[in-house]
Image (cartoon, rainbow, N blue to C red):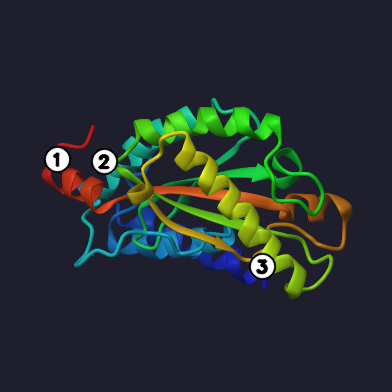
């Protein structure tokens, strides 16, 4: 299955290069082929199909502007302690930013109360979110496969809610947060048969992606 995914990804990349769309920092995203690539890369990266509902196709110029803007957002997020920051794609094939926090950094075992170190990191992250109010936000809690859904789903929900509530307390606008969910063990990013893999799967992810306002600004050529 993994081999098939990477073969598909390779085919998408070949299509993009042959169409002459390979430009720098996000410019690949926004064309029809870019949207296909986004769907594949997003699936591999564990993306949860975040993205503003938009009508019609997103042009290459819009995708390039959003890509450059999100590169800046990513650089700001990378300054947050204990945050793992990645570029992914949203449901529209546009560049987005995924920020992951290991649950061991945020919470005690089987708990959903943020510890002091977590609050320090999230306070800095809240500053990034407030400074990028044109980004919509989705928060997802995840667990490993230890235990069962009756335990894991409520725990992941409570942990996602704890992160959301702390960010709101730091001044992040409630209207900016479009989703806050717990997904239990259903979306692993590593092998649950190893201790290292289970640790990676116990996490809270925050997605920062293009809002409708950002997409409109990019369409108008005014997004910086």
Q: Which of marks 2 and 3 is nearer the N terminus?
A: 3
Q: Earlier in the sequence, mark 1 or mark 2?
A: 2
Determine whether, in the image, residue 98 is placed left or right of residue 37: right
Do callouts 1 and 2 mark residues in contact (Cβ within 8 Å)? yes
Query: In this view of the protein, which residue sits in the foreground, 48 or 25?
Result: 48
Q: Is mark 1 on a helix, strand or loop?
A: loop
Read off the residue under disc 2.
Answer: 65
**Separation of disc 1 and disc 2 at Cα?**
8 Å
Read off the residue under disc 1.
Answer: 221
Determine whether, in the image, residue 71 is placed left or right of residue 201: left
Quadrant, the N terminus: bottom right
**Separation of disc 2 and disc 3 at Cα?**
32 Å
x, y percent for residue 14: 44, 59
For residue 3, the mark is 3
Q: Identify the image quadrant of residue 27.
A: top left
| Neighbour tally class for label 2: few under 14, some 14-19, many 20 plus, Cα within 10 Å | many
Quadrant, the C terminus: top left
Query: In this view of the protein, which residue sits in the foreground, 99 or 15?
Result: 99
Q: Residue at x 79, y 73 (%)?
A: 148
Q: Is mark 3 on a helix, strand or loop?
A: helix
Is residue 42 shown above or below 206? Answer: below
**Separation of disc 1 and disc 3 at Cα?**
39 Å
Q: Can residue 199 be seen in this view?
A: yes
x, y percent for residue 71: 40, 35
Q: Residue at x 56, y 28 (%)?
A: 80
């Amino acid at each position: 299955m993994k081999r098939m995914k990477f073969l598909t990804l390779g085919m998408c990349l070949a299509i993009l290069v042959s169409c002459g769309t390979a430009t720098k920092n996000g410019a690949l995203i926004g064309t029809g082929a870019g949207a296909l690539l986004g769907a594949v890369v997003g699936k591999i990266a564990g993306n949860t199909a975040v993205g503003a509902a938009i009508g019609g196709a997103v042009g290459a110029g819009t995708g390039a502007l959003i890509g450059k803007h999100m590169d800046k957002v990513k650089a700001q997020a990378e300054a947050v302690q204990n945050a793992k920051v990645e570029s992914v794609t949203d449901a529209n094939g546009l560049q987005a930013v995924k920020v992951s926090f290991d649950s061991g950094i945020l919470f005690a075992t089987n708990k959903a109360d943020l510890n002091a170190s977590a609050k320090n990191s999230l306070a800095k992250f809240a500053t990034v979110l407030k400074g990028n109010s044109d980004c919509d936000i989705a928060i997802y809690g995840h667990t490993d496969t230890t235990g069962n859904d009756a335990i894991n789903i409520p725990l992941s929900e409570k942990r996602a809610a704890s992160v959301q509530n702390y960010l709101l307390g730091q001044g992040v606008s409630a209207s900016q947060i479009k989703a806050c969910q717990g997904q239990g063990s259903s979306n692993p990013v590593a092998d649950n048969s190893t201790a290292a893999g289970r640790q990676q799967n116990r996490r809270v992810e925050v997605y920062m992606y293009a809002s409708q306002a950002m997409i409109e600004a990019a369409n108008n050529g005014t997004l910086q």
